[in-house]
Amino acid sequence: MKQEMRRVLLTQRQELTPEMRAQQDAALRRHLLEWLARNPVHCLGVYWPIRGEPDLRELYGELAERDVQLALPIVVAPDAPLSFSAWTPGEPMEKGAMKVPIPAAPRQTLTPEALLIPCVGFNRERVRLGYGGGFYDRTLAQTPRPIAIGIAYHQAVTDFAADLHDIALDIVLTDQGEIS
């Protein structure tokens, strides 16, 4: 069931027009800035968008200028939690595991206070539907647990039951606002 749901949601996301995507990304960036103003963090785990995920990269430079340390996720092993490498916008990137861009010269490993986690979909209980690898669930199962901020377009809300290994996000930010 989740495989079919993923396929449908990914197809819907790919069908967004460039104009719609730009509007929704801008709204998401505003909502994230508002959240960060209320909940300042020193180290934020971010992501590099793939497969039509919401693109927040325009905001990353602004956050770095505000002295927020950014960290990009790195897959270290198929069944392991993610590792996070210090990163500054503009640094050279290369393809890492799963063909996801990572810093070409990974630097200091960090433990972010909060993570931006892209969602293929999510339900009303803030359980994330990802690509099925379980990397973020394993990462959120660690101690200390970072604040988990799902990032999604509002169209990604769907109905599904959580599996035993699924870990709910603390909040989900969409282009239409915050779901907590």
Image (spheres, rainbow, N blue to C red):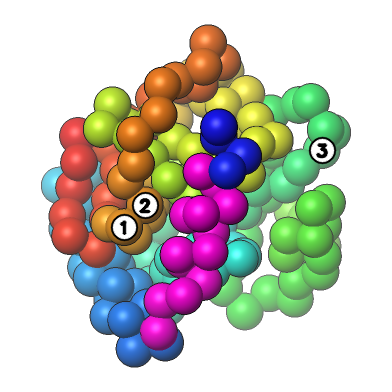
Residue 12 makes an appearance in the image: yes
User: Which one is nearer the viewer's eye here, 18 or 150?
Assistant: 18
Instruction: Tell me the element at label 3.
Output: loop
- Check the picture and name the quadrant holding the C terminus: top left
- Given the image, on which type of amino acid does mark 3 rest? Val
- Given the image, on which type of amino acid does mark 2 rest? Ala
Magenta residue check for 50: no
Q: Looking at the picture, how far across and down is residue 164, in whole percent?
A: 53, 11
Which residue is identified by label 3? 76
User: Which one is nearer the viewer's eye here, 164 or 84?
Assistant: 164
User: Which one is nearer the viewer's eye here, 20 or 35?
Assistant: 20
* Residue range highlighted in magenta: 5-17
What residue sits 73% from the left and 60% below the top? 100
Using the image, tell me which numbered label, if any, was put on residue 155: 1
Which residue is identified by label 2? 156
- Given the image, on which type of amino acid does mark 1 rest? Gln
Q: Looking at the picture, how far across and down is residue 86, in whole percent?
A: 63, 53
Q: In which quarter of the image is residue 83?
A: top right
